[in-house]
Image (cartoon, rainbow, N blue to C red):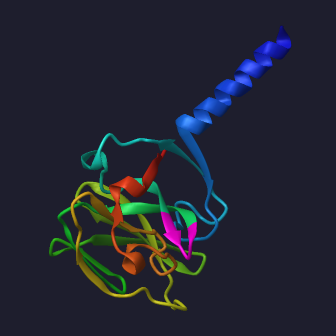
Amino acid sequence: MVTWSIATVLLAILAIKTFFIGYYRIPQNGMYPGLPAGSRVFAAQRAYSGASSVKRGDIVVFVREENGQRYNYVWRVVALPGEKVEASGESLTINGQAVQRQRVREADGKRVFREQIGDVSYEVAFDPSPRYRPPDVSVMVPPDQFFVMGDNRFDARDSRYFGPISFSSITGKKL
């Protein structure tokens, strides 16, 4: 009897993980300061009923193929379909409005800011002397697509490199 109970619990856990909750480990510092390298993230799978339910500020998990391999990425949605995004260095503009930032602190050799876009706010980090600077971009986000960025702005391979992501590539939302 106990064996059946344990087996039932294990099957239930496996079903929940398979169909409802994903578990991811952040391998690098692209989402620092909120999710530094080594962080573990739980994400609701199939969290969105449609593209219109994705909100600015959501941290999404999406799949992207590079060099014939599929990778899971965990980045923040900063712009929605139909919005114009311009990013250059530390500057980020959405629909002609500069994103507001307030300096919060210095940590791990980075400057940390509270970034606010509309009523959504979160922390981002900038390395004062980065090894690489992301490319400058100016793009209108197409329908059913989203512009995503890492919170560690000079250490994230995000939409500035590969463009907006499609809704169909999103597999989850951070819980």
Q: Is residue 103 above or below residue 78?
A: below
Q: Is residue 161 above or below residue 30?
A: below
Quadrant of the image containing the N terminus: top right
Q: Is residue 76 above or below residue 109?
A: above
In x, y percent, where is residue 135? 38, 87
Seen in the image, is 161 located left or right of residue 54? right
Quadrant of the image occupied by residue 119 = bottom left
Dominant SS type (magenta): strand
Seen in the image, is 55 located left or right of residue 12? left
Along the line of sight, which residue is nearer the eye, 53 or 3? 3
- The stretch in magenta equals 64-69
Give the farthest residue toward the front.
68
Along the line of sight, which residue is nearer the eye, 159 or 39? 159
Q: Is residue 61 above or below residue 15?
A: below
**Residue at image point 16% right, 71% down:** 95
Residue 94 falls inside the magenta stretch: no
Determine if residue 127 is in view.
yes
Quadrant of the image occupied by residue 21 = top right
Seen in the image, is 34 located left or right of residue 159? right
Along the line of sight, which residue is nearer the eye, 44 or 87? 44
In x, y percent, where is residue 7? 77, 21
Give the farthest residue toward the top.
1
**Residue at image point 41% right, 80% down:** 161
Determine if residue 40 is in view.
no
In x, y percent, where is residue 120? 30, 55
**Residue at image point 45% right, 69% down:** 150
Seen in the image, is 112 located left or right of residue 94? right
In x, y percent, where is residue 138? 24, 82
